[in-house]
Amino acid sequence: MNSLQSLPAEAPDHADALLERVADIADGPLAALAYRIDQEGHYPLEIMRALGEAGGLDAHLGEHPRFDLAIGAMQRVARRCGTTGFLVWAHQVCGLYMARSGNPALAGARLDAHRRGARFGGTALSNPMKALSGIERMALRARPDGHGGYRVSGVLPWVSHIAPGQYCGALAQVRDDRDRIQGEIMFLLECDDQVELRPCPTFSGMEGSSTWGIRLQDYPVGAERLIADPARPFIAEVRAGFILLQAGMALGVAQGSLDSILEVEGQLGHVNRFLDQRPDTLRAELEDLERRAGLLAATPYDDSRDYLLDVLDLRTQGADFALRAAQSAMLHQGARGYALSAAAQRRLREAQFVAIVTPAIKHLRWEMDRLCREQWPAGEETSA
Ligand SMILES: Cc1cc2nc3c(=O)[nH]c(=O)nc-3n(C[C@H](O)[C@H](O)[C@H](O)COP(=O)(O)OP(=O)(O)OC[C@H]3O[C@@H](n4cnc5c(N)ncnc54)[C@H](O)[C@@H]3O)c2cc1C
C-alpha cells in the first residue's frame, strides 16, 4: 500500500499491516544499525526512507489522520533505536506543520515527498515553545522586508534531522523598525547556502540525529516559506499533537528496556526477582500508558485546557517511565548490559534524552503548574 493512501479509521487490517511493515524495518535493518547510529554517529536516512515508503511517517496526516498509528510506528522504531525514534518524531511534526499550513507551496508535492520519505526535515521549536511559555527569550528575530516578506536573524543551538538540502519548521519574533514586538511568524527554514550550519559538541547519545547549530543573518522568508502568520494560533492548534506524538519515543525506549529484562530472565531470574520494577509491573504500566496515549490520540486538536493537561501529564509520566524502565533493565542485565555494545546502557542515555528534550520534565511541570493556576486562582487553590 502506498503511504499516501490515507487509512480509513474502520480498516484495522490496514493499520496492522502498516505497523507490521514498520516493525519489520525496525527489528531487522534498524536493529542491526543501532550501535553504529549511537556510537559512530551514523545518520540513518536509508532507514527513514524505508519507513516513509512503508507509511510509517505520515499516518497522522491526510484525510483520516491516525495519531495512534503514528505513535505506534514511532514506538516500534524507538524500541530498537531511540535516536531513530526521535528522528521519526521530528519528521512527523515537520509534516504536521506543512500539512496544516494551508500554504500550497508547502502542502502540495512538497508535502507528498516529505510523507513518503523522499525528502527530510525536522523541527526547531524547542526555543519557541519555551519562549511562548515564558521560560526563555525567542532566539530568532524577523523584520518585515517591505515587500510582504521578512528577513530573519539569530542563532539556534541545537536542531536535529537537518543537513544541507533539508529543512525544519522554525519560528521568529517579528520586530518593526522601532524594535517593537509585532507577534511571531512560523516558516519552513530551508538549509540552503544562506544558512550556516555549525557543528555541535559531541553528545553522550543521539549522535546519529544530525544535530546542528543554526545561524541566520537576514534569511529571506517569502510567502512560499510561510507556515503561519501570525504563528500563535497555529502553535495553539498543533501543540498538543506535537507533545502527544513524543509518547512514541518514551513507550519505545521503555519497551526495549522490558525486552532487555526478559532476555536475561531465564538465566538471572532467580536473583533478579529481588529487584524492583520487575517485568510484570513494567508491562502493566506500559499497557496503561499505551491505552492512555491511544485515547488521547483520538482528538489531537481538542483545544480544551483539560485535554492539554492530560497530554502534558502523559508525556511527563512517559518520560519518567522510560527512565525507570531503562534503569531497571541495566540492573537486571548487570555487567553484560554495561558493555559499550549493549542496548541496556544505550537506552539509559536514550531515556535521559526523552526526559530532557523539549518539553523536558521540568518544563512539563512548569506548564502544568501554570495551567492549573490559570484555572484555579491562588485563593481558591488553598481554600479546599
Ligand atoms: C541531542 C539534542 C538534539 C536536539 N534536537 C533539537 C531539535 O531538533 N529541535 C529543537 O528545537 N531543539 C533540539 N534540542 C534542544 C532541546 O530540545 C532542549 O531545548 C535543549 O536541550 C535545552 O533544554 P534545557 O532544558 O537543557 O534548557 P535549559 O536548561 O532550560 O536552558 C535554557 C536555555 O539556555 C541555553 N543553553 C543552555 N546550555 C547551553 C549550551 N551549552 N549551549 C548553548 N545554549 C545553551 C539554551 O537556549 C537553552 O534552551 C536538542 C538538544 C539535544 C541535546
Image (cartoon, rainbow, N blue to C red):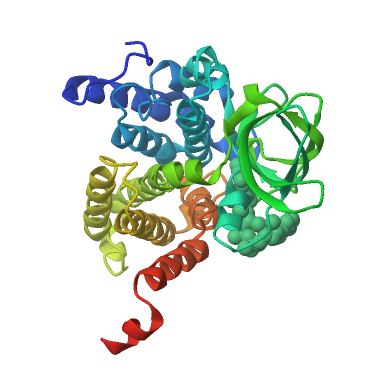
> Which quadrant: the N terminus?
top left
Q: Horizontal and vertical percent for residue 85?
A: 47, 38
Front-lying residue, 48 or 96: 96
> Which quadrant: the C terminus?
bottom left
Q: Horizontal and vertical percent for residue 259?
A: 34, 45
Which residue sits at x=55%, y=21%? 106
The quadrant where residue 57 appears: top left
Residue 247 shows up from this direction: yes
In the image, is residue 30 above or below residue 305? above
Left or right relative to 363: residue 60: left
Left or right relative to 229: residue 149: right
Front-lying residue, 267 or 91: 91
In the image, is residue 12 above or below residue 136? above
Q: Horizontal and vertical percent for residue 350?
A: 51, 49
The quadrant where residue 381 appears: bottom left
The picture quadrant for ligand 1 comes to bottom right
Front-lying residue, 85 or 101: 101
Q: Horizontal and vertical percent for residue 148?
A: 70, 28
Which residue sits at x=32%, y=83%? 380
